[in-house]
Image (cartoon, helix red, strand yellow):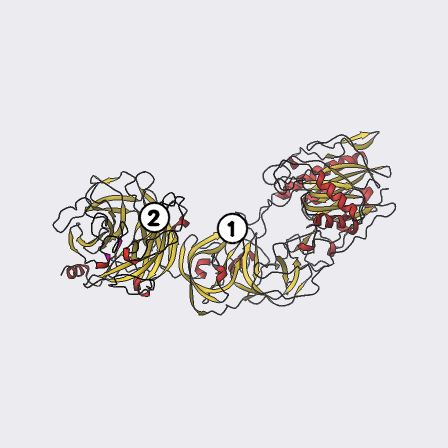
Amino acid sequence: MAVTLGLSALGGALPASGLEPPVVAGLEWLGEAVIPAGTKVDGALVGGLSGLAWNAADGTFWALSDDRSELAPARAVRLRVDLSDGRLDPGDVQVVGQVVLADRDGRHFAPRSLDPEGIAIAGDRLYFSSEGDSNDGVLPFVAEARLDGRVRRYFDIPEAFVPAGEERGIRFNLGFESLVVSPDGRYLYTAVENALAQDGPKADVGVSTLARILRFPLAGGAPEERAYRVEGVRVTPREATAFRINGLNDIVPLGDGELLVLERQYADGIGNEARLYRARWESGDDVTGRARLDADTRPVDKELLVDFDALGIKVDNVEGMAIGPRLPDGRRLLLFVSDDNFNPVGQKTQLLGFAIDESPATIARVQGAGHRSPLEGRWVFDLEGVVTAVVDTRAQRGFWLESEHPDDDPATSEGLFVSWDGAPTLAVGERLRVHGRVVETAADPRQLTVTGLRAEAIVPLPGTGELPPPRRFGVDFEIPFAIEDDALETFDPGSDALDLWESLEGMRVELPGGDVIGPTLRYGEIVLLPEGSVGVRRTAAGGALLEPAGPPRTRVALSGRIHKISDLDVGARVAEPVRGVVHYDFSTYKVVLTEALATTSPERAPCDVETRLTQVSGRLTAATFNVYNLSAKASDERFDGLGRMIAERLGAPALVALEEIQDDSGPEDDGVVTSALTLSRLERAVAAHGGPRYEPVWIDPEPGREGGQPVGNIRVALLFDPMRLRLVRRGDAGALDAARIVTRGGAPELSLSPGRIDPTSAAFTLGAGEGVRRSLAVEFEVDGEPLFVAVNHWSSKWDDDRDFGANQPPNRPTEAKRLAQAGVVRAWVDELLTLDPEALVLVLGDFNEPQWAPGVSRLAEPPLENLVLRVPEQLRYSFNFDGASQLIDHVVVSPALAESAEIEIPHVDSDCAEVRRVSDHDPVVVRFRVR
């Protein structure tokens, strides 16, 4: 009769909450609120909140205190939660009242006669549970009461749950923690935290436990039972005897037998963790009436939805949850509460709010029409697709998922990268349903983010999916000429290359083969110029020249992180279509190959070329060569390669300007600054290949102040052949000592040789960003004539934004630095030429910018000449960056040297696969008559 009256009061067909049960397709965290310790209501302390229920009638949440009528009579407190701004913030929760529980006679429960844990509300009925106390012989119970807290009746508890020593029933403190009415008002659910004594062990480190869920029909009849597998404790306390537990703490039923299940873990010395699962009632064995569960019992299926660790906050002893009202945007609230155990030190009454997203999750919806997901930070559930690629490297582990049912918006990508440690067990073509959190990841703020999913759970779907057809270059998409013409204000894949690639992020694409214009580098990538690319100026080797407007827009980086790319040089031909998935890292979009490349000869450029500008009588040869972070720690093989390069392939020039010479310990932070051993090893390596016994010239830099690899202390240096020219030594210059122009007998000379060119100038002073190598000035004597040499390594572009970076238009602050450095060096040269217009002046090095850039142009203004402009255009490059062959190593001379000068750029490195290189720059060789 009591149950019948209860259903009548509910109206029979209405959901218990007054709202239809939500479809939980996703969650968004709304924030955290804490009820201050010491808060009281009607004189009773607020705390120990272990159960939560929404009362639609008065618009409050009722939270059950697990005070065992010791601090005050057993009670539930009423909470009003203000979510008018769509957020849960401190101060948004108010305690507005309490309801004291009473037995059927209206008397308060006696101290320690119950242990309140779960609470539910349905219409005019209040339900609460007590897990009892098996140690004190207090039996567990589930009660139905009026909204004033007075019990109307007790539910019959199956005998298997009734404690009988250590042989049977609910374990101490692991009983009926949860209680909730189904949305349709038909059932009352509760569950034990861990296995009953006869059903197996309780949860421990690496040991799961088989709990039971009870479902009472509110229309009458015996309860049904299902088993639920609670995970083992996932952490190991330092002390072997330390308390630890994981348990089923609350349940929220949804439609069609789905349940949200809260598991909360605690370990002494470590704290609490919480996870939210989804289970399906009908998926498990019906264990109703079973006295004991065994190993063959099939628990209900469950899937992890949310790991609360991802919130980035300290989660307390979360025990209760409930679905509440609609938020201002129409979504439903899912609220959690923690039990502070009335412990004001180290614990708190914490409320965590989530918005329930009821719109089905699709990959297109996750990606959105933009560079960042509209669902960033949210959890999405039941995201379906087919696996198109799997990656398992130290840097990246996961898979790409693509929708089998794309939408009709070309601006939204249908592919997505899913990070998951279990990815190696997957196969391409598997159909999956995935739960996880939408994330935007980038290595640093200057890079665009990659929209992805951090998987919580992966569920295989029946059958094998057909891979979606790839989007084809030149058929389904074209790459716009403009990278980004509106500073990312609008998303327009039709006019902006940046947006076009974003609209393909994570998707399968197909390129029609083409030419390799960027060789294989150590991280396994090449750059391809696809067939059909037009308007690209090519190098003699088959590369693509950098233009003032930028590199070729149709170039595509290919990554071999799944299918290894062989060691290809510039000019290799990819003969068949290229297929892969679009990804972004290191400031560029790229295609991660999902099939091996089919290449045709020639697979190698002529990387073993030798200069024709060898030493001949009456002429002097010089070269500039960036030797890429060379230190004495480099391998014998590397030094041998450099020695052979200089002695044989460069013809042993009389003078070799060197850039990126490190100190003797290289990247070790040990206080070493000198490069004596580094240069000595290089000298010996050259001699071992029949070269001259060079003498080195260098000045140690200020420690840590001149850029390059951290603590490597790179500097410029010179090797010279004492049999062909004589070093004029004056003084003993330090890092900040300037080689000023002075006169002797009316002729210019350097005050210090070697010395530095205006080393304290602001142009060479470390400011924001990377430091810069100060230029080295050296005076030589050649056949009785003074020769003034300036070796340079100007500011790198490290601090510049990349073309496909997050800042649009890109900020390029280093150009101004190089212009300032050019001005300082040019002033030094002008002073020499003012004193002697026929002076022999050689300015060379790595200028880190092309021939048309402001700094190089300023330095090479008449009467000086940049000799590299004499090199035929198809050969005019010394470096390859992202598939663009470009000239950043220069030789600028005074008129007296220009008249007879010859110049050549032997392409021994920049066109070559990294395994065949000795550096990343090509050297530049010049030959001239002194007089």
Compared to residue 878, the image places residue 714 above or below, namely: above
> Disc 1 marks which amino acid?
Ala
The answer to whether 283 appears left or right of 146 in the picture is: right
The answer to whether 703 appears left or right of 328 in the picture is: right
Q: Which residues are magenta?
A: 161-178
Element class at badge 2: strand
Residue 171 among magenta residues? yes
The answer to whether 629 appears left or right of 107 in the picture is: right
Element class at badge 1: loop
Viewer-side residue, 831 vs 750: 750
Label the magenta part by its dominant secondary structure: loop
Please report contact status of discs 2 and 1: CB closer than 8 Å, yes or no. no
Q: Position of residue 92 (x, y in %)?
A: 31, 44
Q: Quadrant of residue 668?
A: top right
According to the image, label 2 marks what residue?
A: 352
In the drawing, what numbered circle is on residue 442?
1
Residue 698 among magenta residues? no
Q: Residues within 10 Å of mark 2 (few under 14, many from 20)?
A: many
> Disc 2 marks which amino acid?
Leu
Viewer-side residue, 190 vs 455: 190
Q: Let me know if residue 374 appears in the view.
A: no
